[in-house]
Amino acid sequence: MYAMKVDDAQAMHWTEVPDPVPKAGEVLLKIRAAALNRADLLQRAGKYPPPPGWPEWMGLEVAGTVLATPAGSRWKAGDEVCALLGGGGYAEKIAVPEGMVLPVPAGLSMAEAASLPEVFATAYLNLFCEANMRAGETVFVQAGASGLGLAAIQLAKSFGAKVMTSVGSPEKAEAVRRIGADWVLERHRDDPVAAFEAHPVDIALDCVGGEVLGNCIEKLAPGGRWILISTLGGEFARISLRPILKRGIRLIGSTLRSRPTEMKARILHGLEEKVWPRFASKEIRPVIHAVLPVARAEEAHAILQRNGNIGKVVLEID
């Protein structure tokens, strides 16, 4: 089979590699589409290696067809599925633990299905498992026009929360309003501290960190939860601890990729049970910015690198 390997100069090459050999409890998939995530850019730069046991090439979420299954599996050859991976999605085939495989939601294409597992699992983990989000609360979502941001906005709104989000342009502001955001901040124009004071926030889902965290965490509502999932805006923040202590605020660090397979399987079970039916009813929908053939992976990466996407970028693999 072929997979997208990265050389020492960080150039990508569609290269012949050995076929995966499924271990006990794994499903073998023929990959039809793989969605991009910002973690792919970090991995390509040598800053975010895959967990042990996963292929060295990039790709955290895919859709495709089942080729082979373990004994007693819920799946059979030919089933259309999507899957959450620790790595290895930019390839023709992948062997995946059965618990990390989900059905393609009714009515969705392979490209749309590939865009779901990583971002919706991340949003679900952090809003429900870490923050225990409740209807009526207000959620702040950083980078609202990203794939993860749009997933988190839709999940929060679908389960009865209000949403404030930040974006980088008027075009992105309009996109997140269409998806349901109640209040939208443009990063280069609006003051987030003033916004937090005007609209008390219960939960912040933060992929940026840095100055915004330092300035705004003490403005959370009493009992607020600040979930830090990345530090794209900087690894350091100056925080006043007394307001955090007095208001009972929690700062929670959270990543999905490094969690044990068993925990990821529980997250995906919750997704399938509570969220997947909302795709069939179109209450929640995938948002795709671009679908490109795998031969144009460099172009796809460039879109993410310049923050040019509204929603997901997906590679099709023949």
Image (cartoon, rainbow, N blue to C red):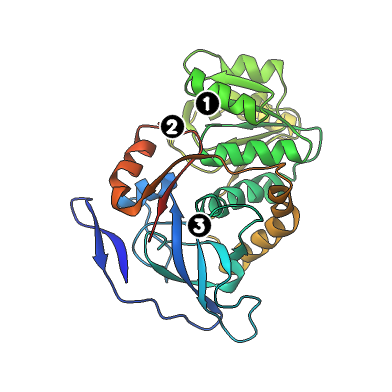
Image position, residue 209 (x, y; %)? 50, 34
Dot 1 surroundings within 10 Å: few (below 14), some, or many (20 or more)?
some
- Picture quadrant of residue 74: bottom right
Answer above or below: position of 228 versus 23. Answer: above
Q: Secondary structure at mark 3?
A: loop
Image position, residue 68 (x, y; %)? 51, 80
Which of these two is toward me, 165 or 114?
A: 114
- Picture quadrant of residue 141: top right
Q: Which mark is residue 212?
A: 1
Q: Point out the frontmost of discs 1 and 3.
A: 3
Q: Which mark is residue 257?
A: 3
Q: Amino acid at mark 1?
A: Val
Image position, residue 188 (x, y; %)? 47, 16
Q: Pointers 1 and 3 in contact (CB under 8 A)?
A: no
Where is mark 2, residue-wise? Answer: 233
Answer above or below: position of 218 versus 207. Answer: above
Q: Secondary structure at mark 1?
A: helix
Dot 2 surroundings within 10 Å: few (below 14), some, or many (20 or more)?
some
Q: Estimate the spatial distance between the alpha carbons at disc 3 and disc 2, rounded to whole Å.
A: 20 Å
Q: Pointers 1 and 2 in contact (CB under 8 A)?
A: yes
Answer above or below: position of 115 versus 220. Answer: below
Which of these two is toward me, 221 or 294?
A: 294
Q: Quadrant of the C terminus?
A: bottom left
For the point 40% across and 51% down, the residue is 315
